[in-house]
Amino acid sequence: MNQPGATFVTLTQNGALRGCIGSLQAHRPLDQDVRANAVAAAFSDPRFAPLKAEELPRTRVEVSLLTAPQPMTFSDEADALRQLRPNVDGVIFIAGQRRSTFLPQVWEQLPQARQFMAHLKQKAGLPADYWSSEVQLQRYEVQKWKEAPIP
């Protein structure tokens, strides 16, 4: 737990996203990274209001430990899409100052590589059909631990 680690903490309620914040690069001890990202997912995810105490009983926690991101080499978007491994790869999309990521778990909602990439581009604030020679992709894998659902 004292070794550097990069984690994402995802909060859900009844299967719906309630907060997700993380680190793409290991820059602090694992226990500190999990703690900081859990607090940020609960109180600082700009997509959601801060978590309230009464929401805790129905909030589930998932922690994803990321491997170091690896740059991908590809000739064009079709080549990049062919290389993606659904349900295995987390992807970091970079285009100039724009950047976004999806954890491998997102493949559950977006199982087709083209659809996954289109949403990743939109998350970065770009059109779904955007492509440029400046696009960089990195991929990573995760180990994840998920809180059991309430019976």
Image (spheres, helix red, strand yellow):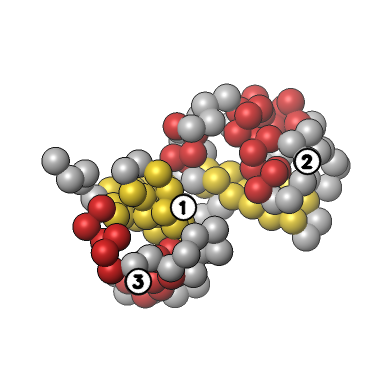
In the rendered view, tell whether residue 31 sits above or below residue 66.
below
Image coords of residue 107 (percent x, y): 49, 33
Q: Which residue is mark 3?
A: 35
Could you tell which of marks 2 and 3 lies nearer the N-terminus?
3
Q: Which residue is mark 1?
A: 67
Residue at the (39%, 58%) spot, across then down: 9
Amino acid carrying label 1: it is Thr
Between marks 1 and 3, how big is the CA–CA gap?
18 Å
Could you tell which of marks 2 and 1 lies nearer the N-terminus?
1
Amino acid carrying label 2: it is Pro
Quarter holding the N terminus is bottom left
Q: Are marks 2 and 1 in contact (CB under 8 Å)?
A: no
Q: Is residue 37 visible?
A: no
In the rendered view, tell whether residue 99 sits above or below residue 50.
above
Which residue is at the front of the view, 12 or 146?
Answer: 12
Residue at the (29%, 55%) spot, across then down: 59
Label 2 sits on a secondary structure element that is: loop
Amino acid carrying label 3: it is Arg
Image coords of residue 6 (percent x, y): 45, 62
Q: Is residue 130 left or right of residue 103?
A: right
